Image (cartoon, rainbow, N blue to C red):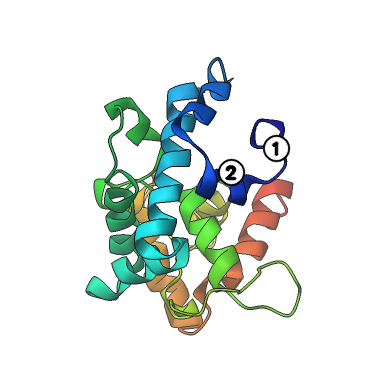
């Protein structure tokens, strides 16, 4: 936040190329300064070319009305700008069999409308019914114990399998079960 003068949206849209020099030396786990600079430039490009993240995701979603395809297409959009190949590892692609947990979680927050105040539900161009559960080790283990999921790996194919099951339970809000599966998984109550 300090590097963006506590105004990240303003910084992303209005930065000059030289302003990115302040990120030299930045590192968080495998995310380095070049990755950070690419993300800032990409977010700016998405804002200017697509009028924001929601529109970029919605455009990708409308191509096939399939959210996992939209995530893969969004990755292409994200890396339309010049970038180092290594930076691509920081954006998951479900069509390459990733569970895309973080992106599915982000989309849940932005799209899903609930009364508990957990999910923001501020995007309206993608239906809640299209969302996929953000699959992780906890939700995967519990889904297997409950016979909702047969696949042993927590990958893109497992997300598709679990999607099919959860959509039978509630076709309008299939990811509402995330809280229960995650909570039981974390606390080993099954």
At x 35%, y 67%, the residue is 67
Q: Nearer the viewer, residue 152 or 130?
A: 130
* Residue under label 1: 5
Task: Answer above or below: position of 148 versus 150.
Answer: below
How many residues crowd around disc 2 within 10 Å: few (fewer than 14), some, or many (20 or more)?
A: some
Q: Nearer the viewer, residue 66 or 163?
A: 66
> Quick one: quadrant of the N terminus?
top right
At x 55%, y 65%, the residue is 108
Task: Answer above or below: position of 169 versus 132.
Answer: below
> What SS does tag 1 mark?
loop
Q: Does residue 16 appear left or right of residue 99 in this picture?
A: right
Q: Nearer the viewer, residue 178 or 117?
A: 117
Q: Does residue 117 appear left or right of residue 159 in this picture?
A: right
Q: Residue 86: horizontal and vertical position, in percent? A: 32, 26
At x 44%, y 57%, the residue is 47
Q: Earlier in the sequence, mark 2 or mark 1?
A: 1
* Residue under label 2: 11
Q: Nearer the viewer, residue 95 or 146?
A: 95
At x 75%, y 71%, the residue is 117
> Quick one: quadrant of the C terminus?
bottom right
Answer whether residue 28 is visible to the viewer in this image: no
Answer whether residue 58 is visible to the viewer in this image: yes
Task: Answer above or below: position of 165 versus 43.
Answer: below
How many residues crowd around disc 1 within 10 Å: few (fewer than 14), some, or many (20 or more)?
A: few
Q: Residue 104: horizontal and vertical position, in percent? A: 48, 58
Q: Residue 12: horizontal and vertical position, in percent? A: 53, 45
Q: Residue 90: horizontal and vertical position, in percent? A: 42, 36
> What SS does tag 2 mark?
helix
Name, please, the residue furthest toward the top: 25
Circles 2 and 1 in contact, beta carbons < 8 Å: yes
Q: Compute the Cα span from label 2 to label 1.
A: 8 Å
């Amino acid at each position: 936040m300090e590097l963006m003068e506590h105004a990240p949206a303003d910084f992303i849209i209005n930065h000059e190329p030289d302003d990115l020099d302040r990120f030299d030396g930045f590192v968080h786990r495998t995310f380095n300064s070049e990755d950070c600079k690419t993300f800032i430039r990409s977010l700016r490009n998405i804002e200017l070319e697509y009028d924001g993240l929601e529109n970029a995701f919605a455009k990708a979603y409308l191509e096939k009305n399939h959210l996992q395809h939209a995530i893969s297409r969004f990755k292409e959009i994200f890396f339309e700008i010049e970038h180092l190949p290594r930076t691509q590892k920081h954006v998951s692609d479900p069509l390459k069999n990733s569970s895309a947990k973080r992106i599915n979680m982000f989309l849940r927050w932005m799209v899903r409308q609930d009364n508990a105040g957990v999910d923001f539900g501020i995007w309206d161009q993608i239906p809640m019914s299209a969302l996929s559960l953000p699959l992780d080790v906890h939700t995967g283990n519990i889904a297997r114990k409950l016979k909702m999921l047969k696949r042993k790996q927590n990958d893109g194919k497992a997300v598709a399998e679990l999607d099919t099951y959860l959509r039978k339970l509630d076709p309008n809000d299939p990811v509402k079960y995330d809280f229960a599966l995650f909570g039981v998984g974390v606390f080993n109550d099954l």
